[in-house]
Amino acid sequence: MLLNELFALIIILLFVPLVWRDVTSVFWPKFIHERNFQHLTFAVIILFTLLWSAQAGVKAGLSIHFLALTTLTLMYGWRVAIVLSVIIGFLLTTTTELSLFQLPEYILLSCLIPIATSYAVFLFSYHFLPRNIFVFIFVAGFLNGALTGTLHLLSSGAYLFFLDAYDWTTIVDNYLIFVPLLAFPEGLINGMALTMFCVFKPEWLRVFSDRDYIYNHYHKK
């Protein structure tokens, strides 16, 4: 198991140069100088810590919880979302049974992969689909959240099978069976959150632009 944790830690460390510039040049100055942004970020960290602490499962390592990482990714961008998820992961070691030794695997499977999935789906919708607010909400939000939640369970299940922690039948019967049940509410949570942000707080969404998703639609007409 030590090799697996070390491998996960190495992968996480490889992301440090990729996120460093964006965090230090964009996120941190805004966080320091804008009190409202500070309050928002602290609230997000607390909310996600509580959300991820509410886990359900029958066997150790086969617990599930809502991610909402699609919303986090579209709010802050994938680089800052990774940093915030790491902070949340450390907080979870104080509120749940997650240990520091397990943290690298947790961050890799439950944070990095879902964030990468969320941003990839967003990029696909941005470059290959019509840019309007409905596509943003339903594809980059709802469908993105459902797909991200599904791939998270599949990748985590495959990883546990690779480690020989459980046989495939146990993983399917106690973990993957929840994929259909989790996909819709995961998509709904992210879709509803993005809908509210688009209407009331579009400035909270880093990837959202009126020029792209609203005015662009009318210009084409």
Image (cartoon, helix red, strand yellow):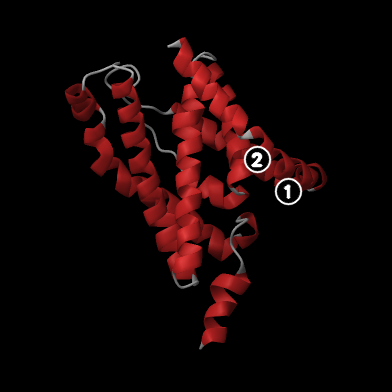
Please report the residue visible at 55 percent of the width from the left and 17 percent of the height from the top. 94
Q: Nearer the viewer, residue 35 or 165?
A: 165
Q: Which of marks 2 and 1 is nearer the N terminus?
A: 2
202 relative to 171, above or below: below
| Separation of marks 2 and 1 at Cα, in angstroms | 27 Å
Would residue 58 appear left or right of 211 to someone viewing this image? left
The structure residue drawn at horizontal position 71% and vertical position 38%, both measured from the top left corner, is 20
Q: Is residue 50 visible?
A: yes
Badge 2 element: helix
Three-letter amino acid code at the position of disc 2: Leu
Picture coordinates of residue 214 (x, y %)? 56, 75
How far across and down, in percent of the image, does residue 125 sit?
46, 63
Disc 1 marks a residue whose amino acid type is Asn
Nearer the observer, 110 or 41:
110
**Which class describes the residues within 10 Å of circle 1: few (<14), some (14-19), or many (20+)?**
few
Residue 70 rendering spot, x and y as whole percentages: 48, 48
Is 216 left, or right, of 68 in this rendering? right
Work out which residue is located at the far bottom of the displayed protein and give it. Answer: 221
| Residue drawn at point x = 60 percent, y = 49 percent | 77
Where is 163 relative to 33, above or below?
above
Query: Judging from the image, what secondary structure is the residue with disc 1 in?
Result: helix
Nearer the observer: mark 2 or 1; the answer is 2
Q: Is residue 177 above or below residue 27?
A: above
What residue did someone put label 2 on?
18
State left or right for residue 21 relative to residue 154: right
Figure quadrant of the N terminus = top left
Label placed on residue 36: 1
